[in-house]
Each structure stands twice: as structure tokens, then as C-alpha cells.
Image: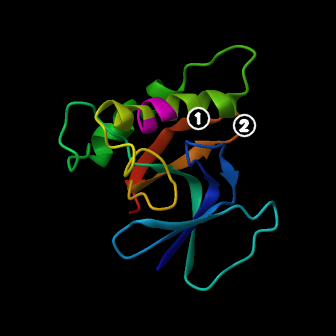
Amino acid sequence: MHRFAANYVCPVSSPPVRNGIVLTDDEGRIMDMIDPHDHFREMSALVFYNGVLIPSFVFQGTPKERKGSEKDMSAWLTEWFSSENPGENPRDTFNKQLKKITLEAAAKIGIQDTMGSLEIGKKPGILLISPFDFERWIPTPMSTITQIV
């Protein structure tokens, strides 16, 4: 069992979780999601990341196993998430944009039961976006994407 936490975990199917914890089995399948409700506590073998944990991106028209390289994804990261909607909560805007390239993309190619969101039983892959601008809820120009699982 592996335990990962970050400043925020974005399940996509629900709002981002502050100091959320994701538990996976050895194959990367999500076994549990923990919302500490602002009472974060350390656990044995817990790895904490500075940034945001998200499900891996799903690219329409590509084989299920293929993933974009971290370098390729980092190149368009800031531009993709920087569109701001006046009057909307920036966290909601980020979550909507993220949903388009994870859960909605997975649904378009029929793999939403296994990929696209961080939910118990799914094996979506987990990415870290770091550093992250939590005030504006967007990646910074220095942000990179790192595959965690």
C-alpha cells in the first residue's frame, strides 16, 4: 500500500481536498481517499508533496496505455489552465478545466470506469503539478508535471 498527500488532491468527480490523502495498492489502484477536514495527521509511510495531485490526463484518440510525456504536458500546462472566468471561483474554474482532460475525455472513449478521476477502485495514474499558485488556482510558469503513480 502507498500513501500520498499534497496541499490539495483534485479527485475531479468532487471538489479539491485540502491536505488530501490517496491510498493506492501496488498496481496503482485507488484503495481509499481521505479528507482530513483540516486536521491533517502524519501516517506511517506517507509521502507529502508540495502542489496538487490530479488524475493522469486522457488524450482522446490515443491508446489507453499511452500517456503524454511530462515535458510535453508541462509545455502547455500554464496556458491551458490560465483562462479565467470573471466572477467564478478560481478553484472551480481549475476543476472544470481539469475535468475536460480527465473524466470527460475518459468518458468519450469509454474508460471512465477505470480512469479519469481519483475514486476508489479506479487506476487513473496520479500526477503532481508543482509549484502551484493557490491564490489564483493556476499552475505557475515554473510548474512541472511529474508522474507519481
Give how far across and how far down residue 19 sits, in percent. Answer: 69, 60
Give how far across and how far down residue 138 sits, in percent. Answer: 59, 34
Which label is found at residue 135?
A: 2
**Disc 2 marks which amino acid?**
Glu
Which label is found at residue 80?
A: none
Q: Residue at x 56, y 42 (%)?
A: 13
Magenta span of residues:
99-103
Residue farthest along the top direction in this orientation: 86
Rate crowding at label 1 as few (under 14), some (14 to 19) or many (20 or more) other CA atoms within 10 Å.
many
Viewport quadrant of the C terminus: bottom left
- State which mark lies toward you, 1 or 2: 1
Residue wearing tag 1: 95
Give how far across and how far down residue 124 sits, in percent. Answer: 39, 53
Q: Could you tell whether 22 is left or right of 112 in the image?
A: right
Rate crowding at label 2 as few (under 14), some (14 to 19) or many (20 or more) other CA atoms within 10 Å.
few
**Disc 1 marks which amino acid?**
Asn
Q: Residue at x 32, y 43 (%)?
A: 111
Q: Is residue 72 placed above or below 93 in the rendered structure?
A: below
Residue farthest along the left direction in this orientation: 63
Magenta-colored segment: predominant secondary structure? helix
